[in-house]
Image (cartoon, rainbow, N blue to C red):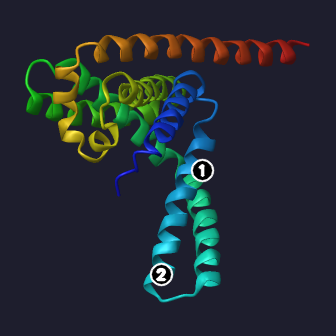
Amino acid sequence: MQPSAELYPWISVAAIAWGVLDCFFGYRVFKITLALVGGLLGAVAGQMAATALGFGPGGITASLIVGGLLGAGLAFLLYIAAVFVAGFGFGATLGILLLANFHHMVALLSGCVLGVVGGFLAVKLQRVLIMLSTALLGSFRAMLALAYFTNQIDWVYYFRQPDQLPALIDNHPWMFPAILALACVGVIAQFELGGSGGKKKAKDKDD
């Protein structure tokens, strides 16, 4: 379903805010974000199941709530799988960004390969890879949504058709440096916040 013209700016603002939050605080809110996404998917699945079974309004509402709670709980329990997905997203996005100007199909295939590598590395090096992946993916999401206001780009289309992302990056040269610049700032911010927390814990232990 395509967002209406009236809602599109608000959805874009929400996507930018979510992207910036992920970019700068991704590691700290990773589990919360995971539970929220799982809750949303569970709620949608519950509503669809209730509608298919012919439940009334009360039954649909109850199924939506139960599905949301189950989805949030299941997503929280599947933490390792989510870490792999985050690492895959980091590797795939990086591959597409780096090779979009050369060949679109090569960029997609390289993104898949780098995504698998990134997924396994994320499981082994969780803290570092989660910071890198949330910073890059958050920056990518924020810049893509920002393009609605700067270039009137239908960014929802590209989330539904990810095979078109290399062409989007190739046709808008400003996106690649802007995404990397914001991601770098986000990574530095996350490491600073993480480092401060680590130093504080170490100091408390010494006391």
Q: Which mark is residue 49?
A: none
Which image quarter: residue 91?
top left
| Residue 180 x/y as whole percent | 37, 14
| Residue 124 x/y as whole percent | 45, 32
Residue at x-position 40% and y-position 42% = 85
Residue at x-position 45% and y-position 48% = 81
Q: On the image, numbered disc 2 is attached to which residue?
A: 51
For badge 1, the amino acid type reads Ala
126 up-or-down from 83: above or below: above
73 up-or-down from 132: above or below: below
Q: On the image, numbered disc 1 is attached to which residue?
A: 35
- Density class for disc 2 (Cα within 10 Å; few <14, some 14-19, many ≥20) is some
| Residue 152 x/y as whole percent | 32, 30
Name the outermost residue toward the front: 6
Residue at x-position 48% and y-position 23% = 135
**Quadrant location of the C terminus in the rendered image:** top right
Asked whether, in this view, residue 131 is left or right of residue 162, the answer is right
Q: Nearer the viewer, mark 1 or mark 2?
A: 2
Q: Earlier in the sequence, mark 1 or mark 2?
A: 1
Calculate the distance from the C-alpha at mark 1 to the C-alpha at mark 2: 24 Å
**Quadrant location of the N terminus in the rendered image:** bottom left
Of residues 207 and 180, the one nearer the viewer is 180
- Density class for disc 1 (Cα within 10 Å; few <14, some 14-19, many ≥20) is many
| Residue 187 x/y as whole percent | 51, 15
